[in-house]
Image: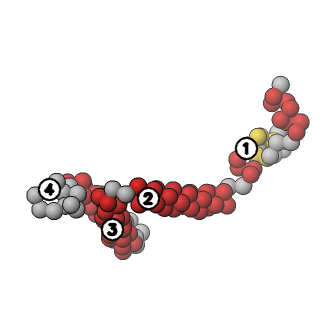
Amino acid sequence: MLGVLGEEPLVHLAPVGQRQVTLALAAGVSFWRKADLERDIGIATLRSFLQLTAIGYVIALIFEADTLWLVLALLVVMVVFGALTARSRAKKVFSVLSRRDMIRFPQKERNQKCRFAVPDRQSLKNIKQ
């Protein structure tokens, strides 16, 4: 079953302890550098622990049920949420970067520093040759 006494534990304490030390170190650096992130780090740690524990039990229950439709439903949910997360992160990245930042070609002009600009057709033809 799910971590019943006498069975192999679902979570080993050594990796959990290592992660807690790393998070404590991050909170300590935040306190030392006066970044005021200790509360956020603590809340994020607790929230991620609770979410991952809950999801772990849900996944274990689904696999223990040994029903194909539940496994497929889990797979669909994971793919949909992964796609939504990737799409939202991509929007943030592309809103910061403009098209000019994607392809950079130096524009040579006298009396000016080298600037970057989007290439015109003639520049692209010269590059291909």
The total of numbered circles placed on residues is 4
Label ID, residue 54: 3
Is disc 2 surrounded by few (<14), some (14 to 19) or many (20+) residues within 10 Å?
A: few
- Name the amino acid, label 2: Trp
Q: Could you give the CA–CA distance between mark 3 and mark 4, rounded to whole angstroms?
A: 19 Å
Quadrant of residue 7 in the image? bottom left
Residue 115 in the image, given as x and y percentages of width and height: 77, 46
Q: Percent position (x, y) of residue 78? A: 47, 58
Residue at left offset 64%, top offset 60%: 91
Say whether disc 3 or disc 2 marks the residue closer to the N-terminus.
Answer: 3
Q: Earlier in the sequence, mark 1 or mark 2?
A: 2
The residue wearing badge 1 is 103
The residue at which mark 2 appears reads as 69
Q: Amino acid at mark 4?
A: Glu
- Which quadrant would residue 103 be assigned to in this image? top right
Seen at 71% across and 49% down, the residue is 101
- Report the front residue among 72 and 19: 72
At label 1, which amino acid type do we have?
Ile
